[in-house]
Amino acid sequence: MQQRTVTLKVPTPGTIIKQLEKLVDRERFLHSLGTYHTMLILCQEYREDPYEGAVVGLIHDSGRCLEYSRIREMLEEYHNPLSEEDLAFPKLWHARLGAAMLERTFGIYSGEMAEAIRVHPTGSPGMSRMGQILYIADYIEPTRDFEGVDRFRNLAFSDRDKAFRAILKSKIAHVRSREQSLHSDSLKALNFYLKEGEEAY
């Protein structure tokens, strides 16, 4: 597991919010603020670092409003090109870029935080607690409005593991229902976290 290595001089959440407002549209900005606040509450509930939670909550979608061509260009500039599989899933590219922007744009050096941002749309095997909490917060933050979201919100504050697995299964089922392809990270995460005897979705 990668150790946390954060620079001594780090930006405050307020500074990040000001930067973020210039990078994304209003809808994505409000979503990011919602994820940020949800991360703070969940980090307090599960005794995780509130600063790290605030940062990943704010930055996770920082590349979301860029054109796909620009995302790809930036990843090439950062010497972090897309994998062959990722090329087939452009809706996930922003997460790869967000992980790189953590260091490049915001000056924060942390492998664990970058990984949490990188896999937040799909999940992956062996995620850190912070990564799982971001995965949950992204799904249940206050601007989310879909049938059943309150059930996931209640579960998130009572059992983190169950909430994570329930959201993972829900997201996979949603993709399956639309007859879309699944990234292998999602399937690997499902196989890794599924309890014995538990239905896949």
Image (cartoon, rainbow, N blue to C red):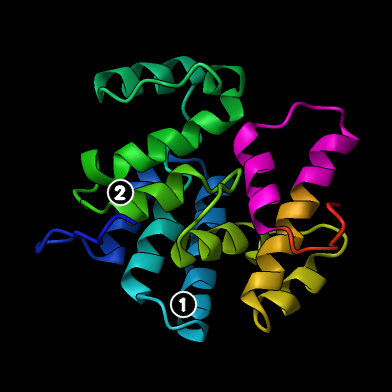
**Residue nearest the observer in this picture, 100 or 146:** 100
Tell whether label 1 touches label 2 (CB within 8 Å). Answer: no
Residue 115 at x, y = what percent? 40, 48
Answer left or right for 133 relative to 21. Answer: right
Residue with the mark numbered 2: 19
144 with respect to 131 (left or right): right
Q: Nearer the viewer, mark 2 or mark 1?
A: 1
Which quarter of the picture shows residue 156?
Answer: bottom right
Instruction: Work out which quarter of the rendered image holds the N terminus and state it.
Output: bottom left
Q: Could you classify mark 2 by the number of other residues whose Cα lies within 10 Å: few (under 14), some (14-19), or many (20 or more)?
A: some
Q: Is residue 140 above or below residue 40?
A: above
Residue lying furthest front in this view? Answer: 196
| Corner quadrant of residue 72 | top left
Location of residue 14 in the rendering, given as x and y in whole percent from the top left corner: 30, 65
Considering the whole magenta stretch, tell me its main secondary structure.
helix
The residue at the point 35 percent across, 48 percent down is 114
Residue type for callout 1: Cys
| Left or right placement of residue 163 versus residue 126 in this view | right
User: In whole angstroms, how far apart are the C-alphas of marks 2 and 1?
Assistant: 23 Å
- Name which residue type carries label 2: Gln
What's drawn in magenta, residue-wise? 172-193
Q: Residue at x 63, y 48 (%)?
A: 189
Q: Position of residue 75 (x, y in %)?
A: 34, 23
Tag 2 secondary structure:
helix
> Vertically, is 192 above or below 13?
above
**Left or right of 17: which side holds 173?**
right
Q: Secondary structure at mark 1?
A: helix
Q: Name the spot of residue 16 as percent of width and height, x first.
A: 30, 56
> How many numbered circles are shown?
2
Residue 132 included in the magenta stretch of the image: no
Vertical comparison of 184 with 119: above or below: above
Which residue position is annotated with label 1? 43
